[in-house]
Image (tube, rainbow, N blue to C red):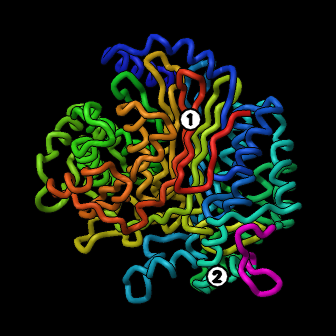
């Protein structure tokens, strides 16, 4: 009942802002007559579409899509990782958040990523160590959601991925490039063995890659559910591999067996005529809502994607959003995350008032929202080994899911045909600052690391589906998602146009971007106002996927920077 009250309150708040769209009832009916899958690989999309054709729900299709992505896009996600879902039920118009974030083992300590000298380990050493792997939660979370919202039998949702693993699939250019890089590093022996052909050559685009061990694992999961991963021989293999050097971890069978995903109310806030919903912390979805809330105090809608002012406002709102996210977000079971204070309209208005007419000096510091404790600046690094997909089924139910193994190919360690995550490197390596102030995202036993994953669902003032979107990209996810939402909701672009917009990540001092993709005069105009765009730092690493209701029905978007598609059944 509390979730219903929260959502109704948000919807009422949105309704009083502006007039909604008179055509939306017809569009809502159209959305219920069709479906769509938007994901990072055509074979994964086809797996999801196949389930929808068989009468499966959006969650049923999500199980199939994730199983396929773990095979054909192992650099990004898999059954050895974690995920968040924002789920929309078309019949009840309720939004639910599912948390499949990994947990730290009982033997974890705040100093586990410090070397003998007391200094943080190098990031590469930490990632490839046995200490980097948390208890995988994606399968358990999907199983929880499927029990609540599925229409087909769990055991029948892995057929497409099993066949691909047994028969093989054509390696894509992106997978081939990342596999070659992984082998070249020489720090991931499991990945090297998997991606090296019998003749000693690394796999190339177009090669057929088979993974019978993964097919066997999927058959076991299909028969036994999450217990296939969290108990028994596969669990034993996970523990054994993570407890091997270099830098062995402390994961135990008891840690795996104790894992439980979470279901909760989402965080929903009005944005003009809309309501945007995201998962609560340790997801950083609320930070995206902060970005929108700051922009609601500007006239960004009057300045389109071809203008200097539009991108200037976006960049400065982003800097304010990141300043607060980096300081205050963590696992709410361990630290107080002041979500209500951060999203308070008066606080957001005060933050927006800090946007200067011209950039000068240091980036803005974090604010002091109600409920905020004393927290140290965060030192977390987040690579972009993540994926996002959106599924709408024939009844209009929606899954917006971001899934990850953290770094590219996770820790690089494999068992039973799949990669293990390095999710624990999402914790702050330094538990405190020099003055002893604790970091909100410090390591602790059983704690879930902070995540930038922020799968979003957008509703109209009556609770009807408008759009869903999300992205991989590590810390940059917040900027990518904010960009896409501004593109669709403020600049009235199609989903495909919105996800293809230039990326601009304003986190701290640098402005990482894609300067060649902006309209003529924008880069020069921004520079004149102190926003100097640079093309370094991985700013091109988005993988946005989304679906929205358009006049012709459902319309999807797939980020041109990756290899995905959006397709109807």
The answer to whether residue 353 is left or right of residue 109 is: left
Report the front residue among 552 and 41. 552
Where does residue 494 sit, x and y in percent of width and height?
48, 34
Q: Does the magenta segment cover residue 195? A: yes
Does residue 369 show up?
A: no
Which residues make up the magenta segment? Answer: 194-209
Query: Where is mark 1, residue-wise?
Result: 547
The answer to whether residue 493 is left or right of residue 472 is: left
The answer to whether residue 387 is left or right of residue 23 is: right
The residue that appears at 44% across and 81% down in the rendered structure is: 121
The residue that appears at 52% across and 56% down in the rendered structure is: 561
The residue that appears at 79% across and 49% down in the rendered structure is: 225
Query: Where is mark 2, residue-wise?
Result: 183
Q: Earlier in the sequence, mark 1 or mark 2?
A: 2
Where does residue 431 sit, x and y in percent of width and height?
37, 69
The answer to whether residue 71 is left or right of residue 212 is: left
C-alpha separation, residue under disc 1 versus residue under disc 2: 36 Å
Is 276 located above or below residue 386 in the figure? Answer: above
Is 242 located above or below residue 31 in the figure? Answer: below
Report the front residue among 203 and 411. 203
Where does residue 458 sit, x and y in percent of width and height?
47, 30
Secondary structure found at label 1: strand
């Amino acid at each position: 009942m509390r979730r219903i009250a929260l959502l109704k309150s948000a919807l009422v708040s949105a309704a009083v802002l502006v007039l909604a769209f008179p055509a939306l009832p017809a569009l809502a009916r159209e959305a219920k007559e069709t479906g769509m899958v938007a994901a990072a690989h055509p074979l994964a999309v086809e797996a999801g579409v196949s389930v929808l054709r068989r009468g499966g729900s959006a969650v049923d299709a999500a199980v199939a899509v994730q199983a396929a992505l773990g095979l054909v896009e192992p650099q990004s996600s898999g059954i050895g990782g974690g995920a968040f879902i924002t789920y929309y039920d078309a019949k009840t118009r309720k939004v639910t958040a599912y948390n499949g974030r990994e947990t730290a083992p009982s033997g974890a300590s705040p100093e586990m990523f410090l070397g003998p000298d007391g200094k943080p380990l190098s990031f590469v050493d930490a990632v490839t160590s046995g200490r980097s792997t948390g208890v995988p939660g994606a399968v358990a979370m999907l199983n929880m959601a499927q029990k609540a919202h599925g229409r087909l039998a769990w055991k029948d949702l892995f057929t497409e991925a099993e066949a691909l693993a047994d028969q093989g699939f054509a390696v894509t250019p992106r997978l081939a490039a990342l596999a070659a890089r992984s082998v070249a590093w020489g720090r991931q022996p499991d990945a090297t063995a998997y991606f090296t052909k019998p003749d000693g050559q690394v796999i190339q685009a177009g090669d057929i890659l088979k993974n019978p061990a993964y097919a066997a694992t999927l058959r076991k999961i299909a028969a036994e559910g999450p217990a296939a991963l969290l108990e028994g021989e596969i669990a034993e293999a996970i523990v054994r591999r993570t407890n091997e050097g270099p830098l062995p971890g402390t994961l135990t069978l008891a840690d795996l067996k104790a894992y439980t995903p979470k279901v909760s109310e989402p965080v929903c806030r009005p944005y003009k005529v809309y309501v945007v919903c995201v998962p609560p912390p340790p997801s950083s979805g609320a930070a995206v809502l902060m970005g929108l809330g700051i922009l609601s105090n500007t006239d960004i809608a009057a300045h389109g994607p071809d203008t200097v002012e539009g991108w200037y406002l976006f960049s400065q709102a982003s800097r304010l959003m990141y300043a607060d996210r980096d300081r205050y977000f963590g696992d709410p079971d361990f630290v107080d995350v002041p979500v209500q204070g951060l999203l308070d309209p008066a606080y957001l208005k005060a933050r927006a008032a800090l946007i200067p007419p011209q950039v000068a000096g240091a980036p803005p510091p974090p604010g002091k929202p109600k409920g905020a404790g004393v927290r140290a600046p965060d030192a977390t690094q987040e690579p972009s080994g993540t994926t996002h997909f959106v599924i709408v089924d024939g009844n209009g139910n929606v899954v917006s899911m971001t899934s990850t193994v953290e770094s590219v190919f996770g820790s690089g360690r494999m068992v039973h045909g799949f990669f293990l995550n390095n999710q624990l490197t999402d914790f702050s390596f330094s538990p405190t600052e020099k003055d002893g102030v604790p970091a909100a995202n410090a390591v602790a036993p059983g704690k879930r690391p902070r995540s930038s994953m922020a799968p979003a669902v957008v509703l109209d003032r009556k609770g009807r589906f408008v759009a869903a979107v999300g992205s991989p990209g590590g810390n940059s996810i917040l900027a990518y998602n904010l960009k896409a939402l501004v593109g669709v909701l403020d600049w009235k672009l199609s989903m495909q146009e919105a996800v293809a917009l230039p990326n601009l990540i304003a986190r701290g001092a640098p402005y990482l971007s894609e300067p060649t993709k902006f309209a003529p005069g924008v880069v020069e105009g921004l520079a004149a106002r102190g926003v100097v765009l640079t093309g370094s730092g991985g700013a091109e690493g988005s993988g946005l996927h989304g679906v929205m209701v358009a006049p012709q029905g459902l319309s999807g978007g797939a980020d041109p920077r990756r290899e995905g598609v959006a397709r109807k059944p």
